[in-house]
Amino acid sequence: MQLTPKVKEILSWYESDNPGTKANIARILMEGRLGGTGRMVILPVDQGFEHGPARSFAPNPAAYDPRYHFELAIEAGLNAYAAPLGMIEAGASTFAGAIPTILKVNSSNSLASPEIKDQAVTGGVDDALRLGCSAIGFTIYPSSDDQFEMMEELRELAAEAKAAGLAVVVWSYPRGPTLDKKGETALDICAYAAHIAALMGAHIIKVKPPTSVISLPAAKKVYEQQPVADIDSLAGRIRHVVQACFAGRRLVVFSGGESGTSEAMMDMARGIHKGGGNGSIIGRNTFQRPKQDALRLLADIMDVYKSPAD
Amino acid sequence: MQLTPKVKEILSWYESDNPGTKANIARILMEGRLGGTGRMVILPVDQGFEHGPARSFAPNPAAYDPRYHFELAIEAGLNAYAAPLGMIEAGASTFAGAIPTILKVNSSNSLASPEIKDQAVTGGVDDALRLGCSAIGFTIYPSSDDQFEMMEELRELAAEAKAAGLAVVVWSYPRGPTLDKKGETALDICAYAAHIAALMGAHIIKVKPPTSVISLPAAKKVYEQQPVADIDSLAGRIRHVVQACFAGRRLVVFSGGESGTSEAMMDMARGIHKGGGNGSIIGRNTFQRPKQDALRLLADIMDVYKSPAD
Amino acid sequence: MQLTPKVKEILSWYESDNPGTKANIARILMEGRLGGTGRMVILPVDQGFEHGPARSFAPNPAAYDPRYHFELAIEAGLNAYAAPLGMIEAGASTFAGAIPTILKVNSSNSLASPEIKDQAVTGGVDDALRLGCSAIGFTIYPSSDDQFEMMEELRELAAEAKAAGLAVVVWSYPRGPTLDKKGETALDICAYAAHIAALMGAHIIKVKPPTSVISLPAAKKVYEQQPVADIDSLAGRIRHVVQACFAGRRLVVFSGGESGTSEAMMDMARGIHKGGGNGSIIGRNTFQRPKQDALRLLADIMDVYKSPAD
Amino acid sequence: MQLTPKVKEILSWYESDNPGTKANIARILMEGRLGGTGRMVILPVDQGFEHGPARSFAPNPAAYDPRYHFELAIEAGLNAYAAPLGMIEAGASTFAGAIPTILKVNSSNSLASPEIKDQAVTGGVDDALRLGCSAIGFTIYPSSDDQFEMMEELRELAAEAKAAGLAVVVWSYPRGPTLDKKGETALDICAYAAHIAALMGAHIIKVKPPTSVISLPAAKKVYEQQPVADIDSLAGRIRHVVQACFAGRRLVVFSGGESGTSEAMMDMARGIHKGGGNGSIIGRNTFQRPKQDALRLLADIMDVYKSPAD
Amino acid sequence: MQLTPKVKEILSWYESDNPGTKANIARILMEGRLGGTGRMVILPVDQGFEHGPARSFAPNPAAYDPRYHFELAIEAGLNAYAAPLGMIEAGASTFAGAIPTILKVNSSNSLASPEIKDQAVTGGVDDALRLGCSAIGFTIYPSSDDQFEMMEELRELAAEAKAAGLAVVVWSYPRGPTLDKKGETALDICAYAAHIAALMGAHIIKVKPPTSVISLPAAKKVYEQQPVADIDSLAGRIRHVVQACFAGRRLVVFSGGESGTSEAMMDMARGIHKGGGNGSIIGRNTFQRPKQDALRLLADIMDVYKSPAD
């Protein structure tokens, strides 16, 4: 497989990684309909853990079967499929080599006491290797009272993954006692969360699309003195988050958020694309619809990412 | 031993496991009167730990002797016998090869402060191997404030067990500060608990038979919009739990609950069988009666599971 | 040394242990005046740790010297001597081979805050091996808020000890927030504590002699429906504890309790013997008297255990 | 490269270190415009972690790119560049061998609850080695309720680093419940913090420039009886801190503090130089200005350190 | 070097230790002006950690230099020098072989919250070995809420040290919520603390000189029934502590306490000597005076220990 110049350029950003890790980043970037563009759409299916099976799969019962998600990702021509241990184990052999997989190695659930902002480590690098995964995925909750421990878990798993030639994807979702609901998606907080993931050595960073709120009191003055250009457009806000990812030298993708209309999803993709983000990671908005609807939406979204970013 | 097509099909679900683990799952499925049917009845004897010796064994004092339980399971023609370290050690050599054993590797007790929802790790994979066990058994309490730590213990023991060719059985019993007594057996919670066990990589999942209660406020809307078919029958509820176990691609068995009449036990088995559950795990209701009564009840229950499921 | 039929029978109960462990159990059972009878008297000297040196040794100052206790145990013809690291180190070479030793590997002290029911791990299996010990001894406090952690420490040390061919002696002393003083020696609680030790894989179990109190509310009904025969006699209560130790297939010894008269000690031994207990573990009541008195008392007690149990 | 007599003398202070560690200390001391003088200026860029990307880099957006800081440090002729994992990874290959790097292996952030005075371990000695770093950097917060755990982390990482031939740089920043804001930079506290770092085995110590406040009540009498000479001048206070660093036999550098004017920075350097401090570690005050301004300021500061200290 | 009969006798007490450890105990006992007598004077310099540099060294600024303390100990002809990692590293090569060193491997400081009675582990056995030390030193705080954890740290470090042929010195300083200030130096508590250190396997025990207070309510009756002979003299109280150290079969030394007059120091040494204690461990009272004064005082104290103990 001949890598495109764009993918070669991206790999050059990861200059400290071993060839094994670079090859796995390339596998993700060269896969599917967006292969070679430097843009990605990833299917994540950890909602069963986070929200329970019925809230996740009852709207489209075919999705109770773990094979459904492999098939959806492959048929749609996505870049990668991310899920917890059991979901990957249930199809890793059948679909071996058919799509890069990301083993989500920590997980939370909706039965936990709401004041606990933490996750359990539910998978390991050994699991990722035996299952043929290209990457591990790990969530941190910057601001949580457990954030330092989560970061230390990430640090250990990431070091182990890199040594084994795997890539590291970090979900950086701020939540904790110093943040209200608005703060969790505030622009300064999202950019900060993305930057922390980059500093921790993530290869691919996943954050939520930011609003135009500035939340941290200590940051307000700076944002007044050096205002973010075009803060009222999603593209402008995305551009700021991309900047926080080492001036765009780390791949950053954005979650689709709660379920929305197809048009809303497309608009979001346009903003991410225009702002220089590297793509979308979309779960509920695809697997909760009938497969044909999902394939159509994903095709449309990928078309956005294939168009020239202005 | 020629595996039946049904057992071969079930093994195909565990496509990521090594031959050692597959062989141990097959050993359990091919054992006893239900051997080869894909249905199982398992004898668990951890009540001594959970409730103390007199509450467990005084009604049938022969059961104070650990050998009694091996004999009961073997004579009844069950699929497996599960117990904590000391119980297994006390008969593993005498009954070596006579019945698959499951080493229960964590345990709680009734002397603990009631607000502590946790268990102690009381056995390990090395113990399971030296004692010739086919599987380890581990309890998680989803919703407990210690749930993440319990899951991390499970993740480590399960990874070690799988690498050593053992199977992993998970008791998934929701309890914790966000759940009242009704919630612990609510349908949505049981299905969620079973799904979490599947996501953690369990080969066999043990949950309680669910009631028709829906407990989690966030789940109610989904259950209204996508109602569970036949929710008022046990079979309908079992079917929902089976669905939550990867659309039936993970083995799930149901505990017998508190002591009941033989007829109640039979009805429960009928519901489990009809709903597509893989069997029963029955302790107190067998070893607390005279052995001949227990053998008769177990034979009757296994007859239910041998009949065609409509 | 030719093992007696009784000792051979006892060893057969430990069918899952390796020959090294069996040999060490045999060494303890074949030692001293009760050698070969299946009964034991053990000298434990951890009171210095638990209560301090003066409360332990001032009544008989010769006992400040660790060599005193080796000599007392050897001269009396006891089965074993149990003590913490420093006490064993101080005589292990001089008395090498002269008496089986049990390294007590965790310890508490009277300076701790009274609400903390825990012990520090103060010795290890490596220590036991280099010092030529036959067993490790470990205390658990069932019901304590630290009980699960203590059990996990025991599980790790016991696994290591068994792999190294050592025996495991468990002091199972219930104490914690759900138990009042009466509960700690209640019959149901003592039997439960002994059963937990058996389930954890102990070879020799040490509990306190039970009173006729039934403490756990949930257990009361069972004890009413299946009353313990002869509950008003110590022998009857001992018999119930023995039953809880795998129907007598685990060795169980009883502590002497607080200092009492010689006659009281003899009566207790008679009850233990008659009830099928395997012996006494007596500290303060021996080393706090002049050596000749202690030797006489121990001889008398051993005579009880040498008489036929009716 | 011929070491200067001054550097040879400094290396002689580290008489217990292996040649690998001595070589790395020498690499830092021999690098750049101050090479060989025993004085150092180091560029630290951990503000992105501590304060977020915008507060750190928006004033000079070129600094969002990790390569900028390598270039700044190299062009200015500094002694070393210190940053967290992601920042070093992003340039370690491009700038391999061009400047000694210090991997900052723990980090805090501004999203943490303010009462938590701790950091997450975010890098390791293996990372430092694979990235070609000369040293690891670690922050301790003496007085924090987590200080003992932080020190234990440092102790383990430092032992590992020294065994691997790396140098150890300790940021010693007092903060915690017994210190008010004034106390954190009080002279007695700064000297104490520097001394603790020296006792922990640091090769290079980083503290804040002290004020003339004496904060610890127990220390006041001593400071009255043995007053610090020239306490009202920065040089006098620096001299006291240097004394606390093993009478000047450990390298100690001072942070630039919050952003100030160039003249203020120069004055601070003059005080440090005059007081016998080994240099400055300046972040925000350089990378938040245009590069040419920063280079000029750094050149001026280094000129101060090249002048004879009176 | 020919060991004296006294030292040979002392070594015989440590009958379970390997020749490496015995050699290191002998090195300490044979060193300096008291070499061969079985008495010791040790210089400990951990006050910089405990109280800060100025409170420790400002009264005699030469003492800021770590080499000063090596020289003081060597010139005075002491038995050993004890200090934390950084202090030992700063002179271990220059003074290699000139005096036995004890690496203090845990440390506290005065910036900690007063209710925290704990220390950080700041050195390890590997450090002690690479620095040529003869022993490790470790502080436990019996009665502290962290005491069990401290004891577990000691147990691990001591086991490792003994396996490596090092000696183990334990500072046993009772403090915690159940003890008031008077209790910390009460006779029963000091004897208890010394006994705990002996039980933990210490070779050399360091406690504070006891007062005649009896603090533990449970101990009062025993001390009334078996009164300590000559409790009103220091010698009488020392004799009781020596008795608690395995009837004098463990070396026990006493700290000098807060700074006092030379005559007070001499009196204390006389009491220790007369009571059978093995010597003094004196820090502040020596290094806070001019070196010649300190040498004179130390010579005088050692003369006390060289005189016949009556």
Image (tube, coloured by chain):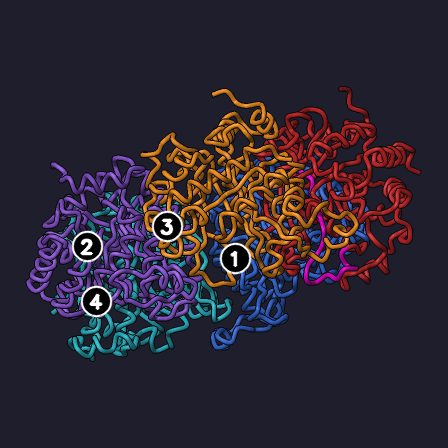
Chain colours: A orange, B purple, C cyan, D red, E blue
Q: Amino acid at mark 4?
A: Ser
**Residues flagged by tags 4 and 3 on a common chain:** yes
Give yes or no for residue C181 being in the magenta stretch.
Answer: no
Q: Which residues are magenta?
A: D168-184
Q: Is residue C180 left or right of residue B94?
A: right
Nearer the observer, disc 4 or disc 2?
2
Q: Which quadrant would the C terminus of chain A be assigned to in this image?
A: top right
In space, the residues marked 4 and 2 are separated at their CA atoms by 23 Å
Per the image, label 2 sits on a secondary structure element best described as strand
Q: Which residue is mark 3?
A: B154
Estimate the x, y position of residue C3 in percent, counting from the top left: 16, 49
The quarter holding residue D137 reads: top right
Can you identify the residue that label 2 sits on?
B279
The answer to the question of whether label 3 and label 2 lie on touching residues, with beta carbons closer than 8 A, is no
- Camera-nearest residue between E160 and A69: A69
Mark 1: amino acid: Lys
> Which chain does the numbered disc 3 sit on?
B
Q: Chain of mark 2?
A: B
Query: What residue is shown with label 4?
Result: B56
| D220, above or below A265, in the image | below
In this rendering, position of residue D303 left or right of residue E306: right
